Amino acid sequence: MDGALLVDLLVVVTLLTAVLSGWARGLGRTVGALAGAVGGALLALAVVVPWAEERLGPQTSPTLLVVVAGILCVVTGAALGTALGGLLHRALARIRLGWLDAAGGALAGSVITAVIWVLVAALVPVVGSATVTDSVSSSRALAALTRVVPDELQDRTALARALERSQPWLAEVAGSPSQPPSIPAVDVDSAALQSSSASVVRVSGDARACRSVVTGSGFVIAPDRVMTNAHVVAGVDAPVVRAPGELPVTGRVVYVDERQDLAVVATDGLDAPALSLRTGARSGDVAVVAGYPHGVRQLQLEAAQVVGQRSTIVTTDGQSRLRRVLTLASDIQQGNSGGPVLGSDGHVIGVVFAKAVAVDRVAYAVPASVAAPVVERAPGMTEAVPTGSCTAA
């Protein structure tokens, strides 16, 4: 059975079960459980995540701690809420309004279950497997629930920051701006940028050594060939690629250059046109960073401006190398790694690989001139190559 269809069936069955259970439990106990669970989740985000960010070292993955503590907070809150809600249940029964209690419980049960499914869909890309991630992402039932649940309930940014600590996407680049640069307004809805957006893909995969799923961005450079960062696919055997509006496809890594942080993924059946590269980006050129920050399902376009292009010393993950770097003014996030920097004409002028360690709104990309030779050879790349290893937690 198709993974997305299985998720659809699970969503429908759990929603029906929630309606029946809510009718039996009543409004008081059902809403009490919801209030307690939400309170527990908020407590986890307000206390557990900041504690993990402050106390754990940069090479320590707090995934297990955050997830277990969060579950305990939610379960405890739900139990307390159910006990308090029982008071309302008994009060309504005494005044012969048990039917109202039951109907309200059925409605509340369906709402609670819908919210839980949406939260699960948001968190799966961070803590699940690549197969599960893309089954959930392709579910039509979850897509429908996502449209009706408020965006505020789907925000997992705080949790994502705590779970994404080990990826080597922060860089120190000699000669970079010492103060946060300003970012000009860019028309991200232009025809050229919207056309190019169809070829910007989400890349995910199981990094078993890190006990996590990595997510990043990429873009189509030839039929069934995708360019991304080497660190995005490090330790990943079978990356999953998904273009906007398309079903996910599983690929294989056929090229890795750790020095330039470039990789090529070969796929079968990826229906998206190749993007063209343009070299010679200059200081002051406006641009857009396209990608999937924090592993979100929807493509995001972030305004950018070229600060400069030069050969300089780049330090990432404790290693320093002389590299050609395109420096940008842009507010990128984890998950943008491997995505294209698009010029106003829709052509690729760089490949995002990192952001500044200490200065906000400074990002770095591999210039198109460095990526171009790889793009030219990409159609002939067919054999899988070793992807290296990620930093074990």
Image: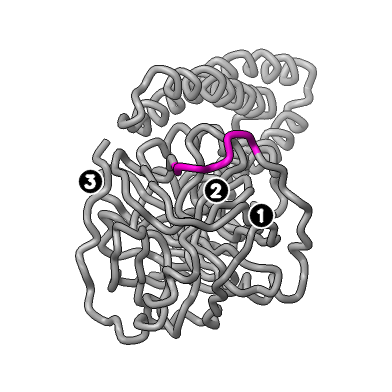
The percent position of residue 220, horizontal first and vertical second, equals 49, 75
Q: Which residue is mark 3?
A: 209
Q: What residue appears at the point 30 percent right and 57 percent down from the top-left corner?
A: 259
Residue highlighted by disc 2 = 363
- In the rendered image, the vertical position of residue 206 relative to residue 245, given as above or below: above
147 or 286: which is nearer to us? 286
Picture residue at 24% right of the left edge, 61% below the top: 387
Coordinates of residue 167 in the picture (x, y in percent): 37, 43
Q: Secondary structure at mark 3?
A: helix
Quadrant where the N terminus lies?
Answer: bottom left
Q: Quadrant of the C terminus?
A: top left
Q: Find residue 321 and report its horizontal and vertical position in percent.
A: 32, 50
Residue 360 rendering spot, x and y as whole percentages: 60, 36
Work out whether mark 2 precedes mark 1 in sequence or the reverse, and give the earlier one. Answer: 1
Q: Quadrant of the rendered structure where residue 264 is?
A: bottom left
Q: Amino acid at mark 3?
A: Ala
Between the C-alphas of marks 2 and 1, the distance is 9 Å
In the picture of the structure, the residue carrying the numbered disc 1 is: 304
Q: For the residue carrying disc 3, how many other residues have a C-alpha within 10 Å: few (<14), some (14-19), or many (20+)?
A: some
Q: Is residue 344 left or right of residue 75?
A: right
Residue extent of the magenta highlight: 173-180
**Are the residues at dot 2 and dot 1 in contact (C-beta closer than 8 Å)?**
yes
